[in-house]
Image (cartoon, rainbow, N blue to C red):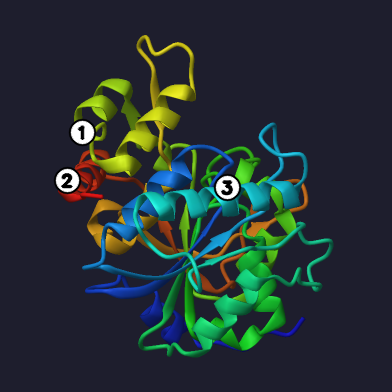
């Protein structure tokens, strides 16, 4: 597949940390775990910074789904549940994503999500791009790029997936669910902000005590977040849980909370390891997160929220 050529200077301009309100869509395997729900809520409670135009359900396959398609459908249902809690209409806002992962790196998996993403991307410009925030397998994003490569010049992809370049392997759930899609997005030259999992966004832990203090009683959605958080483990003694996905929304709300640097895009091998080539295009990668500032922002917004 031949992708449009984006000059390095233009790519770097598009990769500058955002200021003010941005247009965004959120691509989420919402039922896979419990952190996606927090990211959806964080995004929707941040209208001063985030103009959330659509939510896309992502396929996943683990012990909470019988197949990638079943995982996507359960994620779609979870999106609808959250929107109901927040009194946000779902029509024209929530979309089903791919029913399967990529079978090769040239054949997209069409879906309502990919079609909608393309339409919204084509309404964007390099100066005012659409931010595509992906916090699951990146199938929908790769499919949209394969279906309409010209959107590369109009979007910035933010993805939580894989482990840092210094890690011995990158066999992380979001990446390994659809390694081919990750290769497509990394290789195509789209402006790309990468949030590695282990050792970076894995610092975003919270506890039952914090959840009960700052989230319980904050509307139906607050009570639901506490319920799924507590239900995730039967043993809460000296226990905390990482809420990875709010790193992606936090980056757009305040980039200082998620420090990043410009690096050359790595090569993702078939063995799920990283290889380097300093002639490759540039991207932005996160090196750490300000855990306290990010959770404070989420908790304060839930405090102000009323059903």
Mark 2 nearby-residue class (10 Å; few <14, some 14–19, many ≥20): few
Q: Is residue 297 left or right of residue 196?
A: left
Nearest to the observer: residue 209 or residue 146:
209
Tag on residue 162?
3
Q: Does any portion of residue 109 appear in the rendered image? A: yes
Q: Quadrant of residue 2?
A: bottom right
Location of residue 182 (image quadrant)? bottom right
Mark 1 falls on what kind of element?
helix
How far from the left and from the top, in percent, is residue 292?
22, 39
Mark number, residue 300: 2
Cα–Cα gap, marks 1 and 2: 8 Å
Percent position of residue 243, x then y: 40, 38
Screen quadrant of the N terminus: bottom right
Q: Is residue 199 left or right of residue 2?
A: left
Rate crowding at label 1 as few (under 14), some (14 to 19) or many (20 or more) other CA atoms within 10 Å.
some
Label 1 to label 3: alpha-carbon separation: 30 Å
Q: Is residue 29 visible?
A: no
Residue beneath label 1, please?
214
User: Could you tell me how far apart the alpha carbons at marks 2 and 3 are, in whole angstroms?
Assistant: 30 Å
Tag in front: 1 or 3? 1
Give the image location of residue 295, x and y in percent: 25, 41
Name the N-terminal-most of marks 2 and 3.
3
Residue 142's place in the image compared with 75, above or below, is below
Between residues 114 and 285, which one lies in front from this camera angle?
114
């Amino acid at each position: 597949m031949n992708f449009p050529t984006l000059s390095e200077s233009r790519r770097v301009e598009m990769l500058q940390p955002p200021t003010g309100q941005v247009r965004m869509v959120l691509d989420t395997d919402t039922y896979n775990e419990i952190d996606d729900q927090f990211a959806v809520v964080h995004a929707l409670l941040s209208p001063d910074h985030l103009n959330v135009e659509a939510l896309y359900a992502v396929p996943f396959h683990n012990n909470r789904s019988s197949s990638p398609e079943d995982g996507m459908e359960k994620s779609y249902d979870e999106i609808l549940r959250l929107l109901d809690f927040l009194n946000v209409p779902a029509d024209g806002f929530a979309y089903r994503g791919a029913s399967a992962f990529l079978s090769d790196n040239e054949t997209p998996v069409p879906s309502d999500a990919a079609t909608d993403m393309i339409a919204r991307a084509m309404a964007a410009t390099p100066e005012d791009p659409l931010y595509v925030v992906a916090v699951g397998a990146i199938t929908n994003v790769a499919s949209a790029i394969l279906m309409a490569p010209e959107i590369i010049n109009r979007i910035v992809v933010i993805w939580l997936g894989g482990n840092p370049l210094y890690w011995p392997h990158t066999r992380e759930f979001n990446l390994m669910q659809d390694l081919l899609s990750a290769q497509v997005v990394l290789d195509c030259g789209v402006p790309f902000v990468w949030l590695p999992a282990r050792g970076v966004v894995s610092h975003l832990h919270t506890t039952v005590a914090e959840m009960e203090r700052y989230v319980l009683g904050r509307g139906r959605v607050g009570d639901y977040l506490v319920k799924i958080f507590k239900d995730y483990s039967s043993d809460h003694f000296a226990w905390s849980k990482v809420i990875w996905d709010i790193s992606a929304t936090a980056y757009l709300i305040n980039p200082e909370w998620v420090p990043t640097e410009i690096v050359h895009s790595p090569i993702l091998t078939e063995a799920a390891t990283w290889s380097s080539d300093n002639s490759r295009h540039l991207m932005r990668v996160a090196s750490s997160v300000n855990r306290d500032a990010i959770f404070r922002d989420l908790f304060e917004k839930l405090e102000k929220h009323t059903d």
